[in-house]
Image (spheres, rainbow, N blue to C red):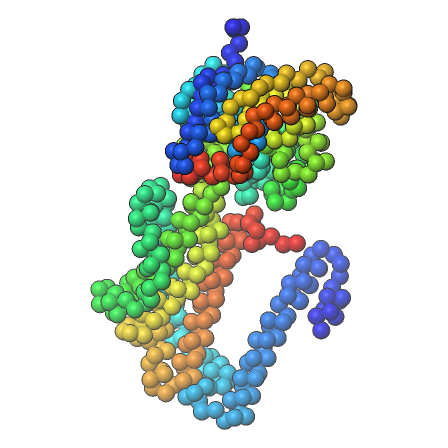
């Protein structure tokens, strides 16, 4: 093993929800090296969002453990080692764009001048300069999600966790934000763990795609995506792009024996359990 | 009529805004004036007895003649209502914060708070009169405070707890503790709920104070004036006192709306096209 710790290291991890006695994740092993872009893909209810939340120490595993940057997930959360982006932008309506991005910086105790400077950089990064004073409800869905990404990156976390961030957006906005996300990933050099159920999106973005099977959630296989970097719109026309999509699709089909899983049960279960 | 008003307004932003607010208010103002004129005409035309319904002009005359004592009575009663409002709302918000923190306690207590919301608490007015002395302002403050307590408690708790789970997760990802989550997410999230309860509470506090005074109170109180003048066939005076109570109630409500607008300009209810 090299000297730099793994960005994410998961060993023998299982998660059983007591309510409903559901085995959501079963014996997951997954390593993510620093700088990688790894997608978790699988059918609804395969536990991919749960796995992401376990990495973020927002849910506790039943067995096994997740490590982030060589420490426990819990310690990594306390050290603010990761930024997270949800499907819903989760912006606070009572804060302007500026103050939404400012929130994690305030939590980390940055002073006013440092915050203002960083917010300006972040708005440039996500191309939202000029929208400082807007409230979230004055922005389109795509713009809201860009604010959410700017906020997650504002304190320069080494790891970015993304839970279907573009799932609620239209196809065109989604492709544009995919390109933007790759540009940001190249510029910041951060590690990304990205949950999606779009096969094309996972192949386009990732250096590796971890394909998960439905309940209990297991890793059915990992596809190494060796498309050239940096990627752009032309990547989608690369001959190996279609090959990788076929690989992912095949793995999905193999791990997809019992299909009847309704979408939102998984999140509902853990919400009930955490008493949020 | 309104079409002419809109067309006359210049297209500048300020002019348009003023013009729009004038045309917004015009129908309501017309109804008010029309209603008063109709009232006056009906009372005169049908020769309605003054103990059933005095004419608006007679009420206005009495209001003007007795403005000094009526104003003092209004202030007296408003002090009671406002005192009860402050005490009841403060205790309710504090209780809601406590219950939001200890969810298990909330689960066992909330059914009673919700049931209390459905009880005609005003029926306790004679009791609080006895507890705190019928001639004291505190007895009316007590009934106003009890009246406002439950709706503010229930609404505030709902606002503090109906937070999207992802909002909380996001804060936890920043290593936020319970107090920071409370201050930065739960409380702002609860503000719209709290303000809608406070608006209802202004009305309830006025009702509590005045109805409390109907039972037994100092002679300086507005409720006493209304009840006493009605009993002495001074109907114009009773109506004049009701007008004072209504104006104070509207000002009270309006001032809470103003505070709401100032603190929550971001909220959907304050948004304009």
A182, above or below A172, in the image: above
Q: Looking at this rendering, what residue extends furthest in the front direction?
A: A257
Q: Which residue: 42% across, 45% down?
A: B161
Could you tell me which quadrant the N terminus of chain B lies in?
bottom right
Number of disc labels: 0
* Viewer-closest of B171 and B88: B171
B220, above or below A112, in the image: below
Q: Residue B178: percent from the left, percent from the top?
A: 40, 35
Q: Which residue: 51% across, 23% down?
A: A218
Q: Which residue: 44% across, 89% down?
A: B50
* Viewer-closest of A65 and B48: A65
Could you tell me which quadrant the C terminus of chain B lies in?
bottom right
Q: Is residue A169 left or right of residue A113?
A: right
Q: Which residue: 45% across, 91% down?
A: B49
A181, above or below A208, in the image: below
A9, above or below B176, in the image: above
Q: Is residue B38 visible?
A: yes
Residue A34's quadrant in the figure? top right
Q: Residue A264: percent from the left, percent from the top?
A: 52, 39
Q: Is residue A156 visible?
A: no
* Viewer-closest of B131 and A272: A272
Q: Residue B57: percent from the left, percent from the top?
A: 51, 84
Residue B180's quadrant in the figure? top left
* Viewer-closest of A221 and A236: A221
Q: Residue B139: percent from the left, percent from the top?
A: 27, 65
């Amino acid at each position: 093993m090299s000297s730099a710790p793994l960005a994410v290291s998961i060993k023998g991890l299982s998660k059983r929800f007591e309510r409903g006695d559901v085995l959501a994740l079963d014996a997951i092993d997954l390593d993510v090296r620093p700088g990688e872009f790894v997608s978790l893909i699988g059918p609804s209810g395969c536990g991919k969002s749960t796995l992401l939340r376990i990495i973020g120490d927002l849910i506790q595993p039943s067995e096994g453990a997740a490590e982030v940057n060589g420490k426990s997930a819990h310690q990594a959360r306390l050290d603010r080692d990761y930024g997270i982006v949800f499907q819903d932008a989760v912006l606070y309506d009572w804060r302007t764009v500026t103050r939404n991005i400012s929130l994690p910086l305030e939590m980390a105790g940055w002073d006013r001048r440092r915050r203002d400077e960083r917010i300006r950089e972040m708005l440039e990064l996500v191309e939202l300069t000029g929208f400082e004073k807007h409230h979230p409800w004055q922005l389109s869905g795509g713009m809201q999600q860009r604010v959410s990404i700017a906020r997650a990156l504002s304190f320069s976390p080494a790891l970015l966790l993304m839970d279907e961030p573009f799932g609620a957006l239209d196809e065109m906005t989604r492709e544009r934000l995919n390109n933007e996300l790759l540009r940001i990933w190249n510029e910041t050099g951060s590690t990304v763990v990205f949950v999606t159920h779009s096969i094309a999106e996972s192949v386009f973005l990732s250096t590796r795609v971890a394909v998960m099977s439905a309940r209990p959630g297991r890793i059915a296989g990992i596809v190494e995506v060796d498309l050239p970097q940096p990627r752009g719109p032309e990547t989608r026309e690369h001959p190996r792009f279609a090959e990788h999509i076929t690989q992912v699709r095949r793995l999905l089909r193999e791990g997809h024996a019992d299909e009847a899983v309704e979408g939102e049960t998984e999140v509902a279960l853990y919400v009930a359990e955490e008493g949020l | 009529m309104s079409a002419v008003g809109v067309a006359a307004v210049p297209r500048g932003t300020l002019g348009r805004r003023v013009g729009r607010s004038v045309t917004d208010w015009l129908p309501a103002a017309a109804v008010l004036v029309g209603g008063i004129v109709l009232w006056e005409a009906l009372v005169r035309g049908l020769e309605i007895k003054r103990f059933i319904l005095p004419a608006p002009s007679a009420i206005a005359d009495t209001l003007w003649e007795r403005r000094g004592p009526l104003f003092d009575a209004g202030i007296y009663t408003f002090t009671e209502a406002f005192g009860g409002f402050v005490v009841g709302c403060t205790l309710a918000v504090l209780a809601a914060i406590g219950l939001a923190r200890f969810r298990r306690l909330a689960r066992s207590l909330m059914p009673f708070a919700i049931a209390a919301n459905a009880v005609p608490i005003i029926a306790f007015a004679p009791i609080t009169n006895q507890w705190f002395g019928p001639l004291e302002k505190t007895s009316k403050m007590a009934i106003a405070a009890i009246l406002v307590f439950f709706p503010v408690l229930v609404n505030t708790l709902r606002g503090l707890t109906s937070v999207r789970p992802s909002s909380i997760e996001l804060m936890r990802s920043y290593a936020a503790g319970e107090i920071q989550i409370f201050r930065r997410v739960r409380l702002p999230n609860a503000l719209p709920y709290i303000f809608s309860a406070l608006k209802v509470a202004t009305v309830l506090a006025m009702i509590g104070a005045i109805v409390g005074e109907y039972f037994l109170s100092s002679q300086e109180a507005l409720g006493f004036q209304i009840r006493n003048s009605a009993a002495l066939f001074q109907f114009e005076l009773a109506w004049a006192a009701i007008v004072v109570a209504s104006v104070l109630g509207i000002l009270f409500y309006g001032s809470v709306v103003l505070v709401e607008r100032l603190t929550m300009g971001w909220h959907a209810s304050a948004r304009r096209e």
